[in-house]
Image (cartoon, helix red, strand yellow):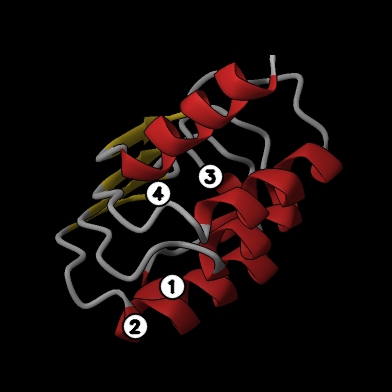
Amino acid sequence: MVDKYEEVWASLQQARDLSFSDCATWTAREVRVLAGTLEECVHVETVSLKNMPLGEAGAAVVSALPRGLVNLMLMGCDLGPAAAAAVAAELPELTALKGLYLSHNPGLGSIAAVVR
């Protein structure tokens, strides 16, 4: 069992695309665990968390994103002001980022607040 876990973990660390879309039952604690694992996925270019209820725990996820990330999909993640501030703070570090998708997050208000 340990060998299989190590094999899956090694594969995850090499992944280019990660999708945790539609994980509507995840708790804030599980989101923070995800954030801890993202730091080790250095080859990831696209992260999709569409329709995952990140809420304010989304700030932890955003701050843990690999620096080579090209696309970040956070549509419908119940993001609010703290997550918006985290996204804005991380943008200068995500120099390869080409796509940032934040639609369907009413708590963000104007997208101008995120990219200002």
Q: Which residue position is annotated with label 4? A: 102
Q: Amino acid at mark 3?
A: Asn
Q: On screen, 35 above or below 5?
A: below
Q: Quadrant of the N terminus?
A: top right
Q: On screen, 19 above or below 97?
A: above
| Alpha carbon separation for disc pair 1 and 2 | 15 Å
Looking at the image, is mark 1 or mark 2 earlier in the sequence? 2
Tag of residue 11: none
Q: Which residue position is annotated with label 3? A: 105
Q: How would you rate the neighbour count of disc 2 (Cα within 10 Å): few for under 14, some for 14-19, many for 20 or more?
A: some
Asked which secondary structure carries label 1, the reply is: helix
**Circles 2 and 3 in contact, beta carbons < 8 Å:** no
**Circles 4 and 1 in contact, beta carbons < 8 Å:** yes
Taking the spot 46% from the left edge, 31% from the top edge, the residue there is 50
**Circles 1 and 3 in contact, beta carbons < 8 Å:** no
Looking at the image, is mark 4 or mark 2 earlier in the sequence? 2
Residue 84 appears in which quarter of the rendering? bottom right
Q: On screen, 113 above or below 33?
A: below
Q: Amino acid at mark 2?
A: Glu
| Alpha carbon separation for disc pair 4 and 2 | 18 Å
Q: Which residue position is annotated with label 1? A: 114
Residue 79 seen: no
Q: Which residue position is annotated with label 2? A: 93
**Circles 3 and 4 in contact, beta carbons < 8 Å:** yes
Front of the two marks 1 and 2: 2
Q: Quadrant of the C terminus?
A: bottom left
Left or right: 99 in relation to 22: left
Q: Position of residue 82 (x, y in %)?
A: 68, 70
Q: Amino acid at mark 4?
A: Leu
Q: How many marks?
A: 4
Residue 29 seen: yes
